[in-house]
Amino acid sequence: MIAISTAGSNLHLALAEGHVGHGVLTYVVVFFGIWWAWMNFSWFATSFDTDDWLYRILTFVQMGGVLVLASGIEPMFTGGDATVLILAYVVMRLGLVAQWLRASRCGGEAGRAARIYAIGIVIVQALWLLMLLLPASLQLPAIALLILAELSVPTLAETFGGRTPWHAHHITERYSLFTLIVLGESLLASANAIIGALHEAEDRTPLILLAVLAMSATAALWWLDFWPPHHRAIGSLRSSLLYGYGHFFVLGAAAAFSAGIELEISVLAGESEVLQPWASFAYTVPLAVFILGVWILAVRRSADRIVNIAVPLAGILVLIDPLIPVPFALTAVILTAMVAVLTWRSPLPEGRIAA
């Protein structure tokens, strides 16, 4: 959570200074490193969680890598220096390689897949280190290619090695819990920013309205994410990859929401180069991405026609908020209506899937 909080804070600073493109692109790269390390560990743990002394030590190695990675986020945002970020990321990934090598001793298809995971991760980490030797002009394209290489490792391992064991309820519960943690971190960052601004504001009404929005939006996102039975969304390799990879956008949007709230506060205080209504898009876009992402990944197949109209419509309509003269009001109303529909309609029973 330290790394996620640091990424969100630096995104806010970049947006407030008017560096929108650079800030968003850097945030995507940084959050990918955080999310990918978490996701790989979670899928490994649901398959081979021995919880012995060596497993715990290797887990702490990966945790240490995350802490170092957090220290490299600011240099990446301010000067484009990815050295600390990449080195810490490689440490995290090599800690998982040791776990996969241990798992390879189980034999059978799972053992073959574990060896492919280990080999693939080692190769990609070597390429990450070589990327640091490239001139700055070539590093961004190299990062894009290496991200694609990282994403290809699970596909290759599960296709050519064999399926590793996992439990649908267990892994989807981990996703939901991580989403809840990220939403809590985002709400905490928003609350701290609003509390800090209240001490200096002459007119507190906009800040109070913004606080209501932050709270109601967080509650609505939580309500939406915990409405569908997530375990129905995964079964085949294709659906598992779609669910797993698609959550990059869901979790990234949840973490970025606080940056949007903080940017709105900076605009209200006259401390940002960004003007309205563009500043409000910094929180409505994350809301829209989260809502549409959860709908596509988990809600759609378990919902009836009414929910499948209401939820995506809410995701689209929140983008209108910045264009309305009364700030924050429309988003709160839309999200409340979405929650009301979800409360009214229950997920379809097991065995019934929406067309």
Image (tube, rainbow, N blue to C red):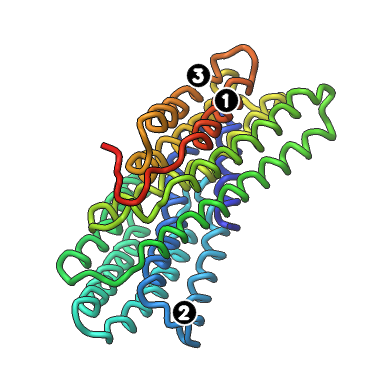
Where is residue 231 drawn, in percent x and y? 37, 56
Which residue is nearer to you in this view: 36 or 251? 251
According to the image, label 2 marks what residue? 58
Which is more N-terminal, label 2 or label 3? 2
Mark 3 is on which residue type? Answer: Ile
Type of the residue with mark 2: Leu
238 relative to 261 in the view: left or right = left
Residue 331, which numbered label? 1
Neighbourhood count class around disc 2 (C-alpha, 10 Å): few under 14, some 14–19, many 20 upward = some
Percent x, y for residue 59? 49, 75
In this view of the protein, which residue sits in the foreground, 134 or 44? 44
**Which one is earlier in the sequence, the residue at label 3 or at label 1?**
3
**Residue flagged by tag 1: what amino acid is it?**
Thr
Q: Position of residue 122 (x, y in %)?
A: 30, 71
Image location of residue 116, percent across then percent down: 22, 72
Res 187 label: none
Q: Tell me if label 3 and label 1 are in contact, CB under 8 Å.
A: no
Residue hosting label 3:
320
